[in-house]
Amino acid sequence: MDPVLSSEVLAKLRRPRPYPAVSLVMPTHRREPDNAQDPVRLRNLLAEAEKALTSDPDVPRERRLDVLDQLNRAAAEVDLAHAEDGLVIYAAQGEHQVWSLPRTVPERVVLSDTFLTRNLVAAHAAEQPYWAVAVAADRVSLWSGDPERTVEAARDGFPLTRSLEPQDVEREQRVGDVPSTFRDEDTRQFLREAHEKLRAVLAAAPRPVYLLGTSEALGLVEELGSLGPDTVTVQHGGLADGPATAVHAAVEPARAARAAATVTVLTAELDAARGRREYAGGIDEVWRAAKEGRARLVAVEDDYRTVVREEGGHLEPAGDGEEGARDDMVDEIVEQALETGAEVRFVPAGTLDGQGRIAAALRY
């Protein structure tokens, strides 16, 4: 299970596969007693997938056996004891992947020549990922975070480590991690190397950055050059070795403040779009705007899900299980909007009161 859902990973998942590429999607539960149903539901969906593969005349026997084996391997990797809100399993010839998502998903099994990625795309858009960089004189670590969790990212040369010279150790034992440590040329060169590696990470995967360290460490990093306007410094030393929970806790106040400011700007932008008559509100209007490529910015409340059916070119409310009902239309809109170059923002529940819980600023 890959802990980092990146744009690069999504692009690989969306590539065509030899038929059949199996997508198994199901909601999961974090707590008792609801999570007792998850193992049963998973077994039922696996049986449904096996039946669909076995009964499909377009699937050669050898490929069917391969895909079934990949499904079984994926199922063995599922950790329902630590489930989040959604589970996605992909299986195709010679490959399988398992994803746990902090976002609920509808239950389904799909056989196609591509994986069903709309739920992962929406989860990625809602994730609000960031990079945290914890700086010390002998270790610089990179962390991938979001509002739910933080994990260390061992990539692109991180973590960067070095052994302190004996005189440095003796000095730190006397006075601690003092400014003189960061005036040392070896330390400056060490952090210069970390700075260059971080710039490479940001070029490949741009995200907001939170720099963690003592004031002296942060001051030296800032002297090496700007990492971009989305960089925030957090004076908190001692986190270069983690743990992940402590890194997350240190970043969270700054992240929450940034998120609140972003929502304020977003609501003002939607109000301005309404004044210019470049606005769509509610799932039907936003769906049509996204399909036509007119959406420039789409805002969605975090927990918004709805069941609809298409009727006469419009979306109408529908009941669960109703014929023609589509229960992941919000995720479909998010994917469609991103494919046409729109920006998608997820906002707290209640932000879009009176706007149908989903709204868009239009290009025209």
Image (cartoon, rainbow, N blue to C red):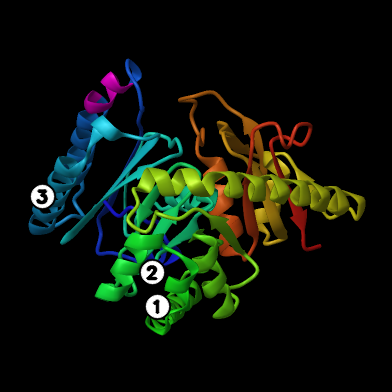
Q: Which mark is residue 137?
A: 2
* Dot 2: element: loop
Q: Which mark is residue 344?
A: none
* Dot 1: element: helix
- Name the image quarter holding the C terminus: bottom right
Residue 306 x, y percent position in the rendering? 57, 32
- The reply, left or right, for residue 87 in relation to residue 48 is right
Tell me, yes or no, whether the two marked residues, 2 and 1, touch with CB atoms within 8 Å.
yes
Query: Disc 2 and disc 1: Cα gap in Å?
Result: 6 Å
Task: Give the residue type that dot 1 points to.
Answer: Thr
Q: Which mark is residue 69?
A: 3
Mark toward the viewer: 3 or 2: 2
Q: Specify the farthest residue to the top.
A: 33
210 above or below 29? Answer: below
- The reply, left or right, for residue 124 in relation to residue 115 is right
Residue in view at x 61 percent, y 72 percent: 228
Task: Give the residue type that dot 3 points to.
Answer: Asp
Mark toward the viewer: 1 or 3: 1
- Could one spot residue 159 in this view of the protein? no
Answer with mark 1 or mark 3, whichever residue precedes in sequence: 3
Identify the residue under disc 1: 187
